[in-house]
Image: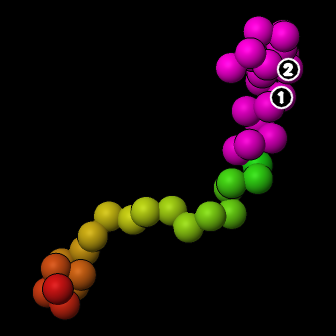
Amino acid sequence: MEDMHLMTVGMCLDYMDEYIQQNSGKTRTRKATQADYDSF
């Protein structure tokens, strides 16, 4: 948290953009279909 005090708004936005790009390849959740409920 202390590092956030040293960062400018632009630096925070760059950090968030980098975080999103690194984690965009992860599997995302999806809405269950009727077939999912039936197999359960």
In this view, 28 is above or below 18: below
Q: Which residues are magenta?
A: 1-20
- Quadrant assignment, res 35: bottom left
Looking at the picture, tell me which residue is in the foreground, 4 or 33: 4
Residue 12 sits above or below residue 20 on the image: above
x, y percentage for residue 13? 77, 24
* Residue 14: quadrant of the picture: top right
Horizontal side of 37 relative to 24 (left or right) equals left
Q: What is the total number of numbered labels drawn onto the structure image?
A: 2
Apparent side of residue 1 relative to residue 6 in the rendered image (left or right): left
Residue 10 shown in magenta = yes
Q: Main secondary structure of the magenta part?
A: helix
* Camera-nearest residue between 35 and 7: 7
Secondary structure at badge 1 equals helix
In the picture, the quarter occupied by the N terminus is top right
Tell me, for residue 14, which label it has, or none. Answer: 1
Mark pair 1, 2: CA separation: 5 Å
Q: Is residue 39 magenta?
A: no
Q: Are marks 1 and 2 in contact (CB under 8 Å)?
A: yes
Residue type indicated by callout 1: Asp
Who is closer to the viewer here, 38 or 18?
A: 18
Find disc 2 in the rendering and name its residue.
11
